[in-house]
Image: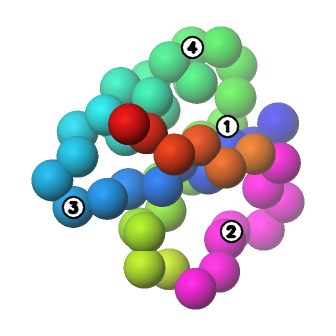
Amino acid sequence: MKVAVVVFPGSNCDRDMAVALRAAGFEVAMVWHKEARLPERIDLVAIPG
């Protein structure tokens, strides 16, 4: 399963979330909050906070 973790300016929770998701076996794509499109084949979007 592939997860997009949304990255916001000033947040560091996105890195923690990515580490946890990778440890759980997910493939992670970091996506800047202003991106207009998600990478291909994203199954889940994770918003840190």
Give the residue at x 47% y 32%: 18
- At label 4, counting other C-alpha atoms closer than 10 Å, the crowd grade (few under 14, some 14-19, many 20 or more) is few
- At label 2, counting other C-alpha atoms closer than 10 Å, the crowd grade (few under 14, some 14-19, many 20 or more) is few
| Disc with the residue nearer the chain's start (3 vs 2) | 3
Q: Spatial distance from mark 1 to mark 4, Cα to Cα?
A: 10 Å
| Disc with the residue nearer the chain's start (2 vs 1) | 1
| Disc with the residue nearer the chain's start (3 vs 1) | 3
Amino acid at the residue labelled 2 = Pro
Amino acid at the residue labelled 3 = Pro
Q: Please give the residue where the numbered disc 4 appears in the rendered image.
A: 23
Residue 48 found in image quarter: top left
Q: Please give the residue where the numbered disc 3 appears in the rendered image.
A: 9
The magenta span reads 36-43
Q: Spatial distance from mark 3 to mark 2, Cα to Cα?
A: 20 Å
Q: Spatial distance from mark 3 to mark 4, Cα to Cα?
A: 24 Å
The answer to whether 14 appears left or right of 37 in the picture is left
> Regarding mark 2 in the picture, which secondary structure is present there?
loop
Q: Spatial distance from mark 2 to mark 1, Cα to Cα?
A: 12 Å
Q: Please give the residue where the numbered disc 2 appears in the rendered image.
A: 39
Q: Position of residue 40 (x, y in %)?
A: 78, 68
Vertical order, 8 against 32 (above or below):
above
Q: Position of residue 27 (x, y in %)?
A: 67, 37
Q: Residue 42: say if magenta.
A: yes
Q: Spatial distance from mark 2 to mark 4, Cα to Cα?
A: 21 Å
| Disc with the residue nearer the chain's start (3 vs 4) | 3
The answer to whether 7 appears left or right of 40 in the picture is left
- At label 1, counting other C-alpha atoms closer than 10 Å, the crowd grade (few under 14, some 14-19, many 20 or more) is some
Residue 49 found in image quarter: top left
Q: Please give the residue where the numbered disc 1 appears in the rendered image.
A: 27
Give the residue at x 82% y 36%: 1
Amino acid at the residue labelled 1 = Glu
> Looking at this rendering, what residue extends furthest in the front direction?
49
